[in-house]
Amino acid sequence: MAEELIMTARGSLVASGSLVSDNDTVMDQTSSQAVMQPPSSTNIPQKAGTSVPPQSQMPIAAVASLIETGPVLTVQNLVCTVNLDCPLDLKMINFRTRNSEYNPSRFCGVVMRLRDPRATALIFSSGKIVVTGTKHEASAHLATRKFARIIQKLGFKVRFLGFKIHNMVSTCDLRFPIRLENLNQMHGQFSSYEPELFPALIYRMVKPRVVLLIFVNGKLV
């Protein structure tokens, strides 16, 4: 009789919500464990449009920017020549012009300098002139014209023939180190590397015809 009264009272408490049944306790414990424990699988579905980039890879935007910009070349010097098509008296040119030097015991030509554009000319008795120091084609052409005009004012019947740019010197910084030994092994037919004599690797390209001085810090000439 007592057991029936206890069961009746227990049923009324469960119905009123004051007492939780054994089955509910087991379900609550199971759900709480499921919340506390980490998921056994890492393949958790993500929301559309969300992704976690790998830590070991460079962002795509940075790679694209590096490819688009590329290395920047800076022209340092142009070497050009011209033929005045007349013999020149170097002693007279040196005597009657400023900013010129002539020492035949050291060099067979007159060294003349301009300020604007900044350039240096090597003037030979055959009428040929070599102009260096400019950084743009227009500046090289203008400087050569000025040198020819100076000589023309001295009484020489000069002509401006065969102006040509023969050499261009540029520099570039790749901004990353280079293993010169490996590069020399992989491109031995085009390169030469002797660190005991010169710190840079000399790389000779065929097409286009270019000579590169490659340094270990990533700088090129």
Image (spheres, grey):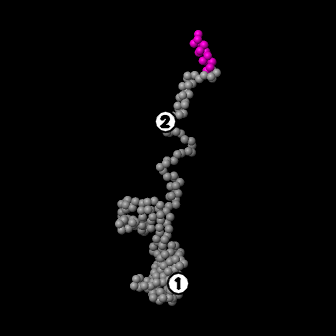
Q: Which disc number belongs to residue 40?
A: 2
Residue plotted at (63% across, 18% down): 12
Residue 3 in the image: above or below residue 54: above
**Where residue 117 sits: x, y (%)?**
53, 77
- Which amino acid does the dot numbered 1 rest on? Arg
Query: Image check: 35 left or right of 218?
Result: right
Farthest residue to the right: give it.
Answer: 16
Q: Are marks 2 and 1 in contact (CB under 8 Å)?
A: no
**Where residue 159 sits: x, y (%)?**
50, 84
Residue 82 in view here: no
Callout 1 crowding tier (Cα within 10 Å): few <14, some 14–19, many ≥20: some
SS at circle 2: loop
- Which amino acid does the dot numbered 2 rest on? Ser
Residue picked out by circle 1: 149
Residue plotted at (51% across, 34% down): 37
107, 22: nearer the viewer? 22
Farthest residue to the top: give it.
Answer: 1
Look at the image and give the residue range highlighted in magenta: 1-14
Residue plotted at (49% across, 48% down): 55
Indicate the quadrant containing the N terminus: top left, top right, bottom left or bottom right. Answer: top right
